Image (spheres, rainbow, N blue to C red):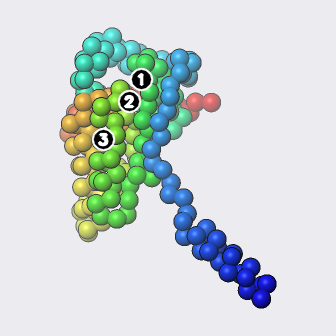
Amino acid sequence: MKNKLSLLLIMPLLFFGCTSGKKISYEQFIKVSPTDSLLAVPVSVKNQLYNFISQQNQTINHGGGCHFLLTNVDKKLSDNTSRWFAAQMQKDIYRIDLSALVSKYIGETEKNLDKVFSTVENKNWILFFDEADALFGKRTEVEDAHGKYANEEIAYLLHRIEKFKGIVLLPCISDSCLLREEQKKFIQIAALLTTLK
């Protein structure tokens, strides 16, 4: 009787423990501090961003959209650059992990993106799409429904970025993650791919 009672008490815990696994979040708010301006960022990248900041600071602060494509950057360099740039602009970062945001279910990726843009719409944050290659790497010649859907997700993200009135940072490991026509919608900041210690 005692064993049956113990089993009855333990079973719900086992059941809920197995089925209510934590969903991995794709969003993170990063509070930027002045010390982030000391992060290691190549001089060439700093110069390109300084040039932009000096010319466009008024546009940014008055709600103009500015969309940056960081190319030839690895994870460390893209993280450092986003934090360094945010410190210069005195803004915080809303970081989106695209590899976690993309869903295998039709329509879910677009819903997640709608939520992202709704969240950041009236905030004074930098929207930083991390792991962009996770999405753009799925671009294919349309041979089946999966390829068509992956391409539609990319088109939807680029459309939302184009309409967004704030600052967007989109890092890519290669300089060919976007098609040439798509790259024209961004201010391209090219880095020599170096691994930061």
Q: Is residue 165 left or right of residue 134?
A: left
Looking at this view, is 37 or 26 the one in front?
Answer: 26
- Give the CA distance from mark 3 to mark 2: 11 Å
User: Which element is circle 3 on?
Assistant: helix
2 or 1: tag closer to the N-terminus: 1
Amino acid type of the residue tagged 3 in the rendering:
Phe
The quadrant in which the C terminus is found is top right
Q: Which residue is mark 2?
A: 126
Query: Relative to 129, does residue 112 appear above or below in the rendering?
Result: below
User: Which element is circle 1 on?
Assistant: loop
Residue shown at 30%/31% (left/top)? 122
- Residue 19, located in which quarter of the rendered image? bottom right
Q: Which residue is mark 1?
A: 91
Q: How many marks?
A: 3
User: Which element is circle 2 on?
Assistant: strand
- Residue 126, located in which quarter of the rendered image? top left
Give percent across and percent down for residue 21: 55, 63
Residue shown at 73%/86% (left/top)? 4
Amino acid type of the residue tagged 2 in the rendering:
Ile
Pointer 3 local density, CA inside 10 Å: few below 14, some 14–19, many at least 20: some
3 or 1: tag closer to the N-terminus: 1
Q: Which residue is mark 3?
A: 117
Give percent across and percent down for residue 65: 25, 27
Looking at this view, is 52 or 115 the one in front?
Answer: 115
Q: Cβ–Cβ below 8 Å for labels 2 and 1? A: yes
Query: Relative to 78, does residue 20 appear above or below in the rendering?
Result: below
Residue extending farthest top: 54
Looking at this view, is 49 or 121 the one in front?
Answer: 121
3 or 2: tag closer to the N-terminus: 3
